Image (cartoon, grey):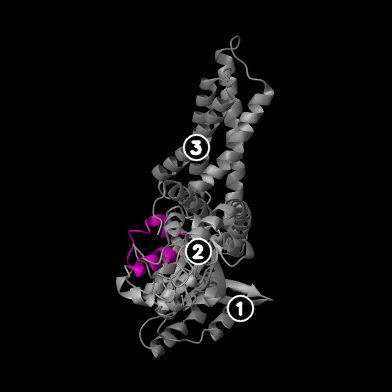
Amino acid sequence: MFKQQVFLINMLLMVLDAVCVIAAGYAAHTIRSYQSYWLWSMDDYGLALSILFIMFLNNLAMGKVGLYGDRRTTSYWKLAVAVFKAVFIDFALLAAMVFLLQDKEYSRSFMLYFAGMTFGLLFAVRVIANVYINEIAGKSFHARRLLVVGDGERGQIVVNALDKQLSLGHQIAGHLPIEGSRDACAKRLAELPSILKGEEIDEVVFAMPRDKPIDLEAYLDLCSKMGIPARVLPVLWHSNKTSIGVEQCQGIPFITLHVNNFGATALLYKRIVDVAGSIVGLTLLAIMYPIVALAVKLDSPGPVFFRQDRVGQNGRIFKAYKFRSMYIDAERSKAELAQANEMQGPMFKMKDDPRITRVGKFLRSTSLDEFPQFINVFKGEMSLVGTRPPTPDEVKQYDLCEYKRISARPGITGMWQVSGRNKITDFSEVVRLDCQYMENWRFINDIKILLKTCWAVLARKGAC
């Protein structure tokens, strides 16, 4: 119900915001034309284009500053600041567009009038909407009355959330505290039928204690028989775990514990970028291959490519490709260098590794040795951005919490690579950065990491 109401409210606000921009545009044009009737006029096409540009851009900007969210706005100062930010973004981009098009006849005063009136109308509409939602809708005859049933802590969390929730009108009718022993909880729950009969209750929200299993089925049946909707806060949920969701499969509801921020749409976006990026990378690989292959062969005996088992998403083993940068017996002599490991943890890193060839040092300092991994990206074994793929020996040394870093597809580059990988010597910091990337993933973050990686490669910074 709340989700549908938020959608309807925000759709209505988007329409009203668009109407405000249209009204502000034509009002600004009228004022500017009246002031300089013989000196300035804008053709209908230019006016309509300016208004349409601001109208569509404004919806994006208003959403960006949080004005199409699910939380009620109670501070008019914060509301004014948010609207100002959105309008500033709108007209800064309009000014940039006019500058790029070199339209010298475009009136700057019209733009200022347009911006000022847009801000004024948008703010006025938002104030009216907030007065209605916060002061009128919640106190109306048809306001939805909710009863919270739960212990002190979890019940209060629900009450606080409902106080902040955007809706077409609701109020907390009461809070039935369920605390003490199991028998005491059952006794308080026994009061529920009489409360529902004697009070005006439109919905019941159950937020039961986590440490006292209580059979709710009878009370949920009671609500159903009386025609009163009921919500249940999952016992698994607590305030520092917000990654629980509910999904349906063939009509069966499942409570899902999300471990990262990768949804189906996110994975699709990543795969599209991975395929496009791998095609570019493979093209560059084909161009550089003859030169690099000749240099590797002349420098030391052995194959051009180095193939090694790596651990991918959730334990999948695949062959990772690199240009060979070490002597052919490097893996056998790794155990002899264990004492020189600069990393604290299962990952091995050594600044002046004697196993690296002369050409290998150049390949690593320029990150050219990584280009064959575009083969892995194209095959879907790796991603452009992700976590560093570990070796099976490294994974065997992981603690349970460290397995989380291999719960997503590994990448050629990632958070810790662009965070100064030469300076990081604690594996726990690598795990923290990898988990931070997965839990807070956004498409734009991948783009930022790719740009930082390109800069680091060109500047020859942070290579290991």
How many other residues sit within 10 Å of disc 1, few (<14), some (14-19) or many (≥20)? few
Query: Callout 3, which amino acid?
Result: Ile
**Residue at (45%, 57%) from the top-left corner?**
359
Q: Nearer the viewer, residue 112 or 229?
A: 112
Q: Secondary structure at mark 1?
A: helix
Residue 140 position in % (x across, y down): 53, 56
For label 2, the residue is 324
Q: Is residue 163 visible?
A: yes
Query: Callout 1, which amino acid?
Result: Ser
How many other residues sit within 10 Å of disc 2, few (<14), some (14-19) or many (≥20)? many
For label 1, the residue is 224
Q: How many marks?
A: 3
**Residue at (40%, 67%) from the top-left corner?**
355
For label 3, the residue is 89
Q: CA distance from mark 3 to mark 2?
A: 49 Å
Give the mark nearest the N terminus, 3 or 2.
3
Q: Residue furthest bottom?
A: 183
Q: CA distance from mark 3 to mark 1?
A: 49 Å
**Residue 326, quarter of the rendered image:** bottom left
Q: Nearer the viewer, residue 396 or 177?
A: 396
**Can you tell which of label 3 and label 1 is closer to the viewer?**
3
Residue 71 against residue 428 in the figure, above or below: above
Query: Callout 2, which amino acid?
Result: Arg
Chain part drawn in magenta = 414-435
Q: Secondary structure at mark 2?
A: loop
Any magenta on residue 434?
A: yes
Residue 106 position in % (x across, y down): 57, 20
Q: Residue furthest top?
A: 38
Give the mark nearest the N terminus, 3 or 1.
3
Give the mark nearest the N terminus, 2 or 1.
1
